[in-house]
């Protein structure tokens, strides 16, 4: 097995079984803020126990290991085809070893391919980087959370939303309300303002690669992200939709330029099991983060 | 103070399921069967008889587990609940035809299912979504599997023995629904927040 294939399996294994520390810390803060003995707090206790158990035993923390998304940054001159082949092989091997559930089915017949590989899957986004290293981010995105994503076209009179940050806020409040517990709250909101329809959703998804505790470099957006969390949590949907103070763990917001006639706001909702991992390969040595 | 969870041995009597109320925390022990989209479609369209003795008095778990075949048989690796609302068009019929005492899932179900639960004495058990590793620990044995070839691993009917499987009753047989209440409360807050 090629080295990159083996690294790819380890990368997927880490994402599926070892939730990033920043996500776990955010869940702990949520747990402590709920009413002692409430169902909301019990649910978060279950979630935290589950995270520790999955990590200790190297088992997938959620059985819906989602669709596999690879975000690759590599220097120009990289053999992208070979890299892609290795990561597809890694996906097959990770499925065989039980780190991934076979989730990929033919669109119309529903026939399972059995190995998480299919048309356009695993999903790849390649970018040429400036540095010498190869960076592979993997994101495992479950079906329940993907189902509650949404795209709004502003202005939208139904939700009293204009083409400004207040309008964006209202769109996201509406989306989090509609999501209730179905996306496995408390989730992370990946939000993109602008772009065309397809680009806007991709921009929203890419926001989910940011750690929970990072601060948006744009001070206006940084303040907006904090406000979005606060406002959405006023809905009281709570963990798994049981009611409570924590409906949303974090919001990550990015901007894309747009056509002057179009104003899209897109939400890619990530469940509390915000599974991502990063592989950095430099000078032939691999590091997993 | 936290109430002690109610222990239920599966299969259980109609009276036992009827005695549960939304908000009750339970620990389930005994045999249950998983089923999701393809299984529910099959149960409603073809009413397969082989499932009748398996389902009578027990519960259907909305779950597509990760399963590995080991030397001594199947082993459940991760097995949390999937979104139940996808089975809303089918569940009432399944409750009526197979005499199940309830379903386990996440997210709750709608009015059609709630009505069937009142009529036939069944309840909805909510398990913690995403807690696949934890819940797999409470599945002590894979007793059998049906339609594995046809449906694939996540969609097959897995007959499982569970011990102290934790869940919360969120819909009961007198029409109570925690989901309906949270939806109404959050809808009121949405109106305020959107200045509508």
Image (cartoon, rainbow, N blue to C red):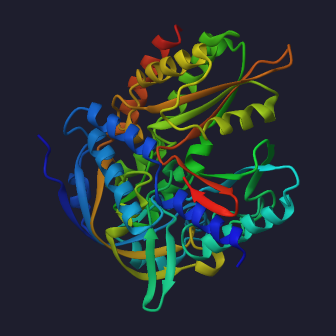
Give the residue at x 51% y 20%.
A228
Q: How many marks?
A: 0
- Quadrant where the image shows the N terminus of chain B: top left
- Residue furthest to the right in view is A77
In terms of depth relative to the viewer, which is nearer, A41 or B106?
Answer: A41
Q: Indicate whether A242 appears above or below A152.
A: below
In this image, A106 relative to A32: left or right? right
- Residue furthest to the front in view is A283
- Residue furthest to the bottom in view is B71
Q: Indicate whether A52 appears above or below B107.
A: below
Q: Indicate whether A275 appears above or below A104.
A: above
Image quadrant where residue A238 sits: top left
Give the residue at x 67% y 67%.
A91
Give the residue at x 35% y 38%.
A242
The percent coordinates of residue A117 (x first, y second) are 73, 66
Q: Indicate whether B195 appears above or below A228.
A: above
The percent coordinates of residue A137 (x first, y second) are 65, 50
The percent coordinates of residue A153 (x first, y second) are 74, 21
The percent coordinates of residue A123 (x first, y second) are 74, 54
Give the residue at x 63% y 81%.
B149
* Res A176 seen here: yes
In terms of depth relative to the viewer, which is nearer, B129 or A157?
Answer: B129
* Res B57 seen here: no
In terms of depth relative to the viewer, which is nearer, B46 or A105?
Answer: A105
């Amino acid at each position: 097995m090629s080295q990159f294939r083996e690294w790819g399996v380890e990368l997927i294994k880490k994402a599926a079984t070892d939730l990033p520390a920043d996500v776990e810390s955010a869940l702990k803060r949520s747990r402590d803020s709920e009413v002692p003995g409430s169902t909301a707090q019990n649910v978060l206790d279950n979630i935290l126990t589950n995270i520790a158990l999955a990590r200790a035993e190297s088992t997938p923390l959620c059985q819906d290991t989602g669709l596999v998304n690879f975000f690759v940054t590599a220097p120009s001159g990289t053999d992208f085809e070979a890299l892609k082949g290795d990561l597809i092989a890694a996906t097959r091997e990770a499925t065989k070893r039980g780190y991934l559930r076979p989730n990929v089915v033919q669109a119309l017949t529903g026939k399972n391919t059995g190995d998480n590989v299919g048309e356009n899957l695993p999903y790849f986004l390649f970018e040429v980087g400036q540095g010498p290293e190869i960076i592979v981010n993997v994101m495992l995105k479950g079906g329940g959370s993907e189902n509650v994503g949404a795209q709004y076209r502003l202005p939208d009179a139904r939700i009293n939303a204009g083409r400004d940050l207040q309008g964006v806020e209202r769109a996201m409040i509406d989306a989090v309300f509609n999501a209730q517990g179905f996306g496995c709250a408390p989730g992370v909101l990946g939000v993109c303002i602008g772009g065309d329809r397809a680009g806007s959703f991709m921009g929203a998804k890419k926001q989910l690669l940011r750690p929970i505790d990072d601060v948006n470099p744009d001070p206006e957006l940084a303040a907006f992200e904090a406000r979005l969390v606060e406002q959405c949590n006023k809905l009281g949907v709570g963990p798994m939709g049981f009611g409570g103070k924590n409906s949303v763990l974090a919001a990550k917001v990015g901007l894309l330029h747009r056509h002057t006639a179009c104003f899209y706001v897109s939400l890619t909702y990530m469940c509390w099991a915000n599974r991502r991992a990063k592989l950095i390969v430099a000078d032939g040595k691999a590091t997993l983060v | 103070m936290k109430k002690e969870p109610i222990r239920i041995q599966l299969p259980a009597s109609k009276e036992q399921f009827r005695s549960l109320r939304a908000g009750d925390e339970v620990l389930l022990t005994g045999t249950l069967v998983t089923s999701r989209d393809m299984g529910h479609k099959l149960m409603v369209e073809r009413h397969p008889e082989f499932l009748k003795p398996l389902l009578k008095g027990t519960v259907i778990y909305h779950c597509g587990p990760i399963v590995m075949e080991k030397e001594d048989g199947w082993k459940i690796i991760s097995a949390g609940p999937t979104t139940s609302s996808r089975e809303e068009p089918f569940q009432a019929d399944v409750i009526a035809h197979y005499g199940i005492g309830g379903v386990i899932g996440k997210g709750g179900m709608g009015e059609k299912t709630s009505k069937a639960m009142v009529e036939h004495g069944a309840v909805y058990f909510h398990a913690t979504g995403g807690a696949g590793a934890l819940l797999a620990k409470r599945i002590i044995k894979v007793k059998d599997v049906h339609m594995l070839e046809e449906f694939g691993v996540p969609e097959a009917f897995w007959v499982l023995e569970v011990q102290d499987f934790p869940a919360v009753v969120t819909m009961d047989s007198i029409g109570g629904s925690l989901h309906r209440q949270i939806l109404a409360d959050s809808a009121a807050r949405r109106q305020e927040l959107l200045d509508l």
